[in-house]
Structure formats: structure tokens, C-alpha cells
Amino acid sequence: MAVTPNTTFTIGDVYTASNANRFPRGIMATPSVSTTGGTFTAEAVQLTTTFNAVNGRMYLILYSEPVLSGSASATCTARLREDSIAGATINQATVTLPTAFTTNVINQSIFTASATGSKTVVATLQASTGTGTTARSSIRFPQLYVMDIGAS
């Protein structure tokens, strides 16, 4: 993917709509959060967010799950998927799922929209063995958000 960066402006340069459209637009939707924890074995949806994508723009997608533990020594796979739990995988991260303490996982990816319109991103977790647990509270909650970082 080729990225065309903004140009450096100097006094007297004309600022165009094309220049303006290269700049990031920031957070695209209210971040998805949850204070309700739970368990998972097979791949399970944790959070979803929907935003208006623009063809050719790049988006930073970030999912963080702050408190994970497991019932057996295993791994936890965190996935970012397009549209639904059955959708294409955008990215995945794997962490050890401990039994005697907790860990966290952060999964982020740059996603370039291939069409203009509503786009849903789904964050999922899956335990390789046993049961995984998310422990959440008002100060330890997962987040899923999408930030527009500019045109590709």
C-alpha cells in the first residue's frame, strides 16, 4: 500500500481540499466498552463497533482487554474481524492465558477501507484449552475503537 504523505507548507502556498483530505480525522465512533466480564472457550464476541468508512482511507483499530485468566494453562487468541464473528480476520494476537494470575492483551491493526459505507469491527477472544475469563470493572474495562489516520 502506497502512502502519500502531506506536504510541508510554506508561506504563500495554497491550501487545497486535497491537502486537507490527507489529514487524519480522529476517532470515528464512540469507543465500545463493557464493564461486564464473563467466560469464553470457543471464539466469542467481546465488543463491536460500527463506523462510516471511506474508500481508500486508513484506520487504526485498537482492542485492549485488561484482565484475562484461564482455567488451564493455555493461550488466548484475540481477533479483530470484519462485520461479524464469521467475517474476515483483520489481525490477531495471542497471549499465554495464566491460571495463577492475570494478563492482558492488546490487538491493533491498520485497516484500509476498500469501499465507502458502514463498517463493523468485531473483537473476539478464544481459549486454546479450558475456559478463559475476563474480569472487568468500572476502572478495568476493555476498549475497541477506530481512528482515521489519513488517506492511503
Image (cartoon, helix red, strand yellow):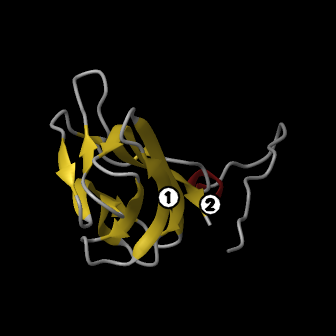
Q: Position of residue 7 (x, y in %)?
A: 78, 52
Label 2 crowd bin: few (<14), some (14–19), many (20+), radius 10 Å: few
**The disc labelled 1 sits on which kind of residue?**
Ala
Residue 8, x across and y down, in percent: 81, 46
Residue 60 appearing in the image: no
Q: From the viewer's perspective, is the residue at label 2 or at label 1 nearer? A: 1
Q: Nearer the viewer, residue 15 or 144?
A: 144
Q: Quadrant of the C terminus?
A: bottom right
Residue 63, can we see it? yes
Residue at 15% over, 37% down: 36
- Is residue 107 shown above or below 42? above
- CB atoms of marks 2 and 1 within 8 Å: no
Q: Dot 1: few (<14), some (14–19), or many (≥20) neighbours within 10 Å?
A: some
- Residue extending farthest top: 139
Q: Is residue 111 left or right of residue 47?
A: right
Describe residue 83's horizontal placement relative to residue 21 as left or right.
Answer: left
User: Residue at label 1?
Assistant: 93
Viewport quadrant of the N terminus: bottom right
Quarter of the rendering containing residue 98: top left
The percent position of residue 60, horizontal first and vertical second, equals 51, 53
Residue hosting label 2: 18
Q: Nearer the viewer, residue 90 or 117?
A: 90
In the figure, residue 50 lies in which quadrant? bottom left
Say whether disc 2 or disc 1 marks the residue closer to the N-terminus: 2
